[in-house]
Every structure is written in structure tokens, then in C-alpha cells.
Amino acid sequence: MIEIRNVSKTFTLHNQGSAVIEVINDVSFAVAPGECVALTGASGAGKSTLMRMIYGNYLTQAGEIRIGDVDLVQAAPREVIALRREVLGYVSQFLRVVPRVPTLDVVAEPLRAVGVTAQDAQARAEVLLTQLNIPQRPWSLSPTTFSGGEQQRVNIARGFARHYPAMLLDEPTASLDAANREVVLSLIEDAKARGAAIIGIFHDEAARTRVCDREIDVSRFTPGVAA
Amino acid sequence: MTDYNFAYLDEQTKRMIRRAILKGLAIPGYQVPFASREMPMPYGWGTGGVQVSAAVLTPEDTFKVIDQGADDTTNAVSIRTFFERTAGVETTTTTCDASVIQTRHRIPEEPLSEGQILVYQVPIPEPLRFLEPRESETRKMHSLEEYGLMHVKLYEDISRHGHIATSYAYPVKVEGRYVMDPSPIPKFDNPKLGDMAAIQLFGAGREQRIYALPPYTQVVSLDFEDHPFEASKADHPCGMCGAIDSYLDELIIDDTGGRMFVCSDTDFCEARQLAGHKGKDAA
Amino acid sequence: MTPLLSVQGISKRYGIHIGCADVSFDLYPGEVMGIVGESGSGKSTLLNCLAGHLAPDEGQVIFDTRADGPRDTLTMSEPERRMLGRTDWAFVHQHARDGLRMGVSAGGNVGERLMAVGERHYGNIRNKATDWLGRVEIDAARVDDRPTTFSGGMQQRLQIARNLVTGPRLVFMDEPTGGLDVSVQARLLDLLRGLVRDMGLSAIIVTHDLAVVRLLADRLMVMKSGHVVEAGLTDQVLDDPQHAYSQLLVSSVLQV
């Protein structure tokens, strides 16, 4: 489902003496449907960078990132957008929404974007928010008013609203209490069971062992800062 | 005669105005620019109409002037006298005897016939001016037939008053092409504009525009499907001659609220009274 | 898939000064593209060239018309181009008073485009106007009020309603949230996002506010001195800018 071949990435900081930083060098691996792969390595090893490259958020200079039959490295913006809408889900650590939009709509939006009716999308959103223990009272409020933990759970609900065939999870269980952590892990297990290919970053070792089939140590591909 | 050239204007000027008139007749409803002259009267007193009249008058013509339908107001009398002195033409107050009729804000009640010319005095010739102040833009709108704005004006009327409250200078569409301001005639007169046997010429002196309707031109008043055009008038018979189908002026006759309604077309009213018709207020 | 708008080699010079130079891109149905850059970078010049308000010196602006398929709008006759401007295109000005008739009621403002394309039933026009006021969150009771009595945010929303009433397919926006205070901006952005999604609109939004493009635009073009220095997916350009100027632009935003 997800296939990464000979991928490399450098940052060029034009405004800081044109420093060139090589972050990732020649990564290759693949993730099959129903498989969950963890990216590991010390902080700064480039886990998040690689994740963002797979989402198309960071530009990849060399190699191939195939998700389904689309090569993200070569794809036009609209193909990337379609891919994100239809195929590739992403749960990041931070919630980014338009202020004023009610929580329920924030969660329902990925479904609305693929043409699910407002009613059905909201019903699904309600189920997820209930599962993740967000009290019903503030559903009509914008999540920007919520606590950090609540915001993260809203973000997870949004990420799992649709059944994506491929998913990227960036620290989905960080700073969650035991009960909510359990909910998230079972969401991940459900996604795997229905055949989603998942790449995740988990600092939580127990969680990693429970849901991940393989680990890839990203530091192996990190060349360090070039002169 | 007098020391003036016939009908005051010099021959070159009259030729220039006649060319504008001919162009106007060839393109009904289109505003033709012309080099309006200074006339011995202020703008707003009919300088456009006077120049058009001067250009079409011949020594054999009989001339009539009406102001809001009346032959006897200061404005009507002055213009009539002006052409008596400068052109030496016959004048009359009888509608059917006149070959050229200059009018301010009315069309005579008596239907006009072929061979007659009706000359309108026009203050603002541009019907779109109300909403679009730029001349360059209104010209473009005319040339591209973009007349949606005209209906915005009527829409505003209905939204504010519940009906189309524009009661004079009511915009019309000529031969399915140009939207035209018929000068501030009451909308009661609008139906007479279309299919008229006489030639209708419109002169705007200050704005330097001439436009025209040749005989038997199709003229349609703009409206909405659910708010159709209605030629309205005061719902009374004429107090003097009893006519029920003529346009009426409201006169306040004392300081206790007494009023009467009389025909605005004085010639029409007098002719009816002579024929023996009598209204309730007739002495 | 045919692009809705295909821009090819657009250049506009003001004497020896460059307005914009050799700009090309394709915009597909349902896409929202942001154009960012500092004042004088040529983004407004480009927008006006695309929308037919300015005649570019070179290039083509090919629009996929409903009737005849792709046509170069620059070589179209003026009546055709103006017709496009009243039907399939919309233009939202930065200052609402440039895009509204301030002497005409809210209903008349919204109804104008309907009347311009031949609607002649007062009741229908009024119903549609009222419906659209609702969609942009203006109380229907204000339908007969003039925009002079509206707040800045309401005027901007009215301008949007007036533009979208004929169901255009392409909307040009010039700093649509400029000059509004932030709470009003947020409401407007949310509204625009909903309208874009529900109507399947394509839009080109010129702004210098990176937060606006992040929330509204799928794609982003960065302009400097009349040239496009970088283009791509909005979050990619903002999070991993490649060109020196884009990096400067992104790093210059104050974090709140």
C-alpha cells in the first residue's frame, strides 16, 4: 500500500548562510495493507520529517513515495489533495482549525469532503467523540477553547472519522490518560483489521509493541549535518 | 422679419442638429451627442427642445408649445413668442392645427397624426444615470445591452413602496434594443409613446444629447412579471370638463383643504368645454 | 480532466516596470489557489489580468466555458467577457464598497446579477436575495437596508452573496479579509470555506496573510517582483519553503 524507495531529503536555509542540512538519506521500505510500522530513533533523527514527506507536507528531493498507485514525489498538488481526501489520513500532534467552527463539524469535515451527508457525518462524529470521552456539552463550541488533551482527542476523532486505506499517526497516544489511550489503541487495531496500512511514531513503548508489526530505525538513514 | 437668421440659429448649426436628428431617427432610442449652443435662455428652460425645434421649423409650419400640458405658462408663452419673433411662424394652441409641438413633460391627450412633430425638452437623457454615475460606463452598458441595472431601480421602488413608485420619466425599451428615458412625462403618457403616427424628437441642451422615435416605433415600458407596468392617474373625473380618461393636475383652491382635479392638457379641456361637456366644479 | 482555468505566460509591464512576468498555471474545478507576496510583488496585477480588468501584454487566460469549452478570455469579444463576469465569474474586492452599490438596498445588491441575466420576476428575485442573505449570515430583516448601515464584516459578506447568487464557477478574491478585525475575519473565512465546499467553487485568492491561505487555499503561489518564485501545495510551501524569499516570508510571521 505504501512503498518508499531511495528517498532523500535536504533542507537549504537560504537566509542562514545557505546552510544545507541533509536530514534523510536513501530510505526504502514498504507497508502492506493491515500492517502497522513504527518509525523509531532518537529525537531529531528525522521521524517526523519522514512522516511529513510521506504526507506530502515536506518536499522530497529524490526517490519515490508510492501510496496506492500515486507517486507523491511527482504528483501535482491536486493529486496530492485528492490522495489526502480519499486515501491517506494523518493524525498530527496539533489541532489546526478555523476558529468558531463547532467541534462536531471539525470531526465531521473529512466525511463531508467526500460527499457524506451532513447528518451521517455528524452521527459518525458523535460516536467518535463519545468514544474518546469528550463531554457532549461543548460539541457545539470550537475546539480552540478546549484543553490540550481534549484538543488532541478531537484531532484523533477527526483523523479516524473516515476509514482511510493508509494512515500516518504522529504520537497519537502522547499525553492521554489510560482510558483514552486504550480507546485510541483499539481504534488503531480496528483500522488494521479492516486493512489499513499504518505508519506511526510512538514514544509509548507499550503501545508500540501492542499495535506495531515492525520497527524502522530512522537514525540509520540520518547522515547528520553536512558542512 | 427680424435681424435674426430664420429660427435664431445659423444655418450651419441647424444642419449639424439635423444630422444628429436623422441619426437619432435611424437608431431609435440611441442618444446622439451634438454640439449644443448657448441659447438666450437658461439651461433647464428648454434649450435642448428649442434647438431641435429651430432645426426642424420651416416658414410654413404652425408651432405650438405646451408646458406640463398648458399653453399659457410663462415657459410656454416665452418659447412661443421666441419663435414668433425669430422665425415668424404661425403659432397656435390647438393640438391638431400644429405641425410642430414643443412640449415639456406631457404628450397631448388628442392623438397626433402623421406629418406632426413632437419635440420634448429633456433635462437628463441618461436613464441609467440614477445608479451609474460614469458616462463611460453607461455608454458601454448601452452598447452591450446591459440593462439589468434599470431593473434594480424598479426593484428598489417595489422594495421600498410595495409597488413601482416611479411615476414620471418611467424607462422604456425601444424596438427591443435601447433603453430610453422618455423625459419626465407622467407614466400615464408612456403607452402613447409607442406606435405613434407623429415623429418624436428629444433634445437635452445641457447634456448635449438628441434622440428620437420615428413614427410607429415599438416602445415598451420596463416592468416585472409580477409587478406589471400600469399607466396611472388620479382617480377622478376632470372638474372642468368631466373627462375620465385624461391626465389630471391637482389644484389646491383654498386654505381649508379644498381641491379640484383638472385636465393638465388645457387645449383638450377647453375643446371639451366648448363642445358642452361640464365637470362638477365648472362655473 | 480539463482545467477550469489555464493561465499561460501572462506578462504585464508598466513602462519599464514589471507588473508580473511569465506566469503560468492550471486551476482545476474545486481548487482554491492562494497568491501571496509582499505589496508590489505583482499579485494584484496578476489577479486583475486574469479577471479581465487589465489587459496583459502577453499570454493567454483560457477558461473552460459552459457552452464552448476552453476559450481564451483575452481574445473574446468584450460582451462575451462581460457576460462571463456576470455569470460564471465573480470578483470579491478588498473594500466592500468597491464591489457594492452603496445607494441600493441589500436585496437590490444581491438581485442585480439575477436581473442582469434576465430574471424579471420580483418575487423570485427577492426570495433568492433573502435566501442568500441567510447563507452569508445576514438577518433577512435587513433585506431592504442599504449597505451604508452595515458593519464592515456584513458589507463584505453582502459582497460575497451578491457575487455568488448566480452560481459562478470561478471566484477571484483580492484580500477578502483585509481591513477586517480578526474575529470578523475568522467568521468570514469559515463562511468562505463552507461555500467553496458546498458549491464546488474554484477560487483564486490574493492576500498577504499566510493564515488565510493556510485555511482556505489548497495550493499556493509565492510572488516576488512580478515573478512566481515558488508554487505548490499550500502546507508544503508554508512548512517546507524552498525559495529564499518564501523562507523569509514564512519566517517573518509572528507566532501568536
Image (cartoon, coloured by chain):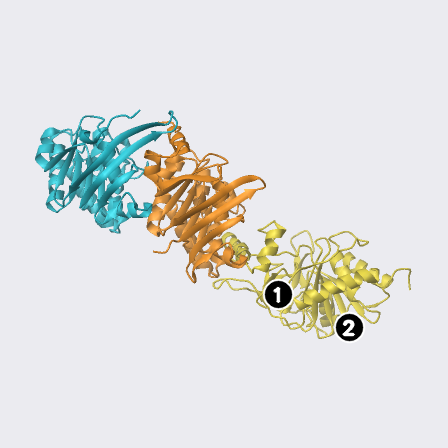
Chain colours: A cyan, B yellow, C orange
Q: Chain of mark 1?
A: B
Residue B238: image quadrant is bottom right
**Amino acid type, label 1:** Asn
Q: Nearer the viewer, residue B282 or C204?
A: C204
The total of numbered circles placed on residues is: 2
Left or right of residue A81, residue B232 in this image: right
Q: Nearer the viewer, residue C98 or C234?
A: C234
- The answer to whether residue B244 is visible is no
Percent position (x, y) of residue B262?
Answer: 68, 63
- Is the residue C172 above or below the residue B1 in the image? above
Say few, some or many: other residues with alpha carbon within 10 Å of mark 2 (under 14 / 14 to 19 / 20 or more). some
Quadrant of the image containing the C terminus of chain A = top left
**Amino acid type, label 2:** Asp
Q: Which residue is mark 1?
A: B190
Left or right of residue B12, residue C190 in this image: left
Q: Nearer the viewer, residue C207 or B244?
A: C207
Q: Chain of mark 2?
A: B
Secondary structure at badge 1 equals helix
Q: Which residue is mark 2?
A: B97
Q: Nearer the viewer, residue B180 or B272?
A: B180
Say few, some or many: other residues with alpha carbon within 10 Å of mark 1 (under 14 / 14 to 19 / 20 or more). many
